[in-house]
Amino acid sequence: MTATTTAQPAAGAAQAIIAKVQGRAIPVRGNDIDTDRIIPARFLRCVVFDGLGEHSFEDDRLGLKAKGQTHAFDDARFQGAKVLFVNKNFGCGSSREHAPQALMRWGIQAIVGESFAEIFFGNCVSLGIPCFVAGEESLARLMDAAEKNPIAEWSVDVEAGMVKGPVEEAATLPAGPKSQFLSGRWNSLNELLTNLPVVDKVASGLPYVSGW
């Protein structure tokens, strides 16, 4: 079964199994791209996450535009892409959930990179966005292929750990998140809401909760 979800399910609702993400790819080159670059701090004042997608990488995009250059997220060739290729330590910096929210609302459903900041990775899991890790040479080949053939279709397979398109590269996903995606149990809040009787039972046995 293949699921390519772009929004969280309603609280308590069944979650989609995410076994494979298919679509075109967009490369964003550079190491240590932090969450403030993914979504600048001035956009954190929003009450809901709607509309964040259009501001993804906004300052980077404006900076390149001022130099007469084009950021990948402004490049018409990559509009509608679902798979994001990145380099080392992607999503570092502050722990803001707005960063993966912005990417998801732009349309990103899977990320393949050399490495990820831990909190960013966890926030992506909770949104149903698998983040795969591949080697430096593999990412170079994936990015080059995406730039040379931007209309190419790619498949990112959670179970097989493979990224397939004009080139094929192995990519890893930790056993825990992999199991969560394949079982449809990637949203921790939803897990709590669908298991409230168990939560109540555990809480009733805790001395610092039962007395409330």
Image: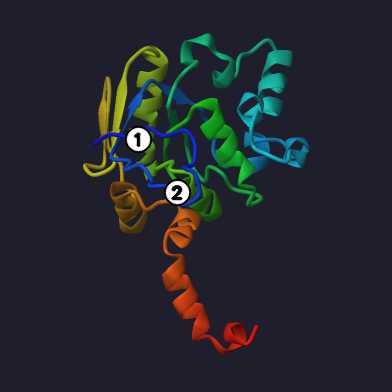
- Residue 119 in percent (x, y) is at 55, 54
| Residue 154 located left or right of residue 198 | left
Q: Is residue 13 above or below residue 148?
A: below
Q: Which residue is mark 1?
A: 137
- Which of the marked residues, 2 or 1, is nearer the chain's N terminus? 2
- In the image, residue 197 lies at what x, y percent? 43, 70
Residue located at (31% from left, 43% from top) = 17
Image position of 135 with respect to 29: above or below = below
- Residue 75, by quadrant, is top right
Residue 9 screen position, x and y as percent: 46, 42
Tell me the residue that label 2 is attached to. 125
Kind of residue at disc 1: Glu
Question: Residue 146's image quarter?
Answer: top left
| Nearer to the camera, 64 or 129 | 129
Residue 18's x, y, as percent? Answer: 33, 41
Q: How many marks?
A: 2
